[in-house]
Amino acid sequence: MKDLGVGVIGTGWVSDEYIKAFSSNPSTRVIAICSRAKERAQAKAEKHELKNCAFVTDPEEMVDLPGLDIVCIATPNFLHAQQTIMAADHGKHIVIEKPIAIEWRDVIRMKEAVDRAGVTTIVSFVLRWNPLVRTCRKLVSDGALGRIFHAEVDYLHAAVRSSGAPPWWTRKETGGSILQENGCHAVDALRWLVNDDAALVVALAGNFRSDFEQDTTITLITKFKGGALGKVCCSCDVVSPYLFNISLYGDKGTLLNNRLWSIEQFPDQSDWITIPAQAPDSGDVTHHPFSSEINHFVECILEGKSTIVDLKDAIKTFEIIEAADRSAAAGGIPVKIPLA
């Protein structure tokens, strides 16, 4: 029996993945789709064969629909903050597509609204459910690498060009920084795998394309509270297929993407061990398991638990991003965390 009613705001490609994920969950049903153009909402519902689905053009109208329990925000980046606050104020559980916001002051307002409402949230860092990323996390947790002293995660993706990027994506005011838009996946993976909070961030950036207002390549270095160092490079300037590189260095082993060297678990190892797990090395959504994310989210709602990447947790990732953007804008000055 599908008890929880879901409303999806936005009709871009990512909305398809959310609709499929919620439709396949036995406890949820998509009952509303919101788009500025009603015909787009109707077309999306027809594509997924949704029955008794409302089509609305105003998010405020959608959150007042009877039987609506969950709001899934899949709109352009600059709308995420206000729509999250609206949904929280109406007592709805919320899926927040990344980035959570463009302005740091809005991040604080979102947290205040969610805390007041006491609703369940999940921020769509879907790579936490990617098989290789999860395997990396378990290897670290099991001590296969020992104490991590250095970690690197890169998000290198030049697939989006001016012919394919929506206009709002290439403007800082509406799309945000390149770290907020794309590199947030790498920053979140870095923080999740090191399993520590950042204390200091330094970054440098540059714009190497004429079709983006934002800097299009940025490299950040962070020092974690426990002493480990981390590095993220995010670029949409590379000439290659999409790359999501993971390098973890510990005092008992090393992990380079799907290659493991561990004197802790394999003391007689003579060659790299290849991990047979699917990596996040493609834009294909099969590498980005939305269903696993949504199933976890729904389970947490039903059991009254917090998700592994709720708004409070995701803010720690975006605090690193905000610090990096501030550092790069100031020519590479160090920025301490927590932010002032």
Image (cartoon, rainbow, N blue to C red):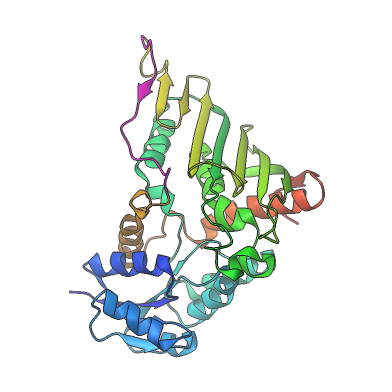
Magenta stretch: helix, strand or loop mostly: loop
Does residue 274 sit above or below 97 in this rendering?
above
The quarter of the image holding the C terminus is bottom right
Decide which of 227, 46 is in the foreground and name it.
Answer: 46
Residue farthest along the left direction in this orientation: 1
Q: Specify the farthest residue to the front.
A: 163
Residue 22 position in % (x across, y down):
30, 68
Q: Quadrant of the N terminus?
A: bottom left
- x, y percent for residue 312: 54, 59
> Horizontal placement of 254 versus 4: left or right?
right
Q: Which residues are magenta?
A: 268-282
Question: Compared to 54, does 306 lie above or below?
Answer: above
- Residue visible at 55% across and 41% down in the picture: 154
Badge count: 0
Picture quarter containing residue 126?
A: bottom left
**Residue 8 x/y as whole percent:** 39, 76
State the residue in front, 155 or 88.
Answer: 155
Residue 173, percent across and down?
68, 69
The stretch drawn in magenta includes residue 270? yes
Q: Is residue 117 left or right of residue 44?
A: right
Q: Residue 75 lies in magenta, yes or no? A: no
The image shows residue 172, relative to residue 54, as above or below, that is above
Q: Can residue 275 be seen in the rendering of this structure?
A: yes
User: Which residue is found at the position 62% from the left and 47% from the top?
Assistant: 237
Quadrant of the rendered image containing residue 9: bottom left
Residue at 53%, 77% (x, y): give it: 83
| Residue at 51% over, 31% down | 247
Q: Kindly tell me whether residue 338 is visible in this rendering.
A: no
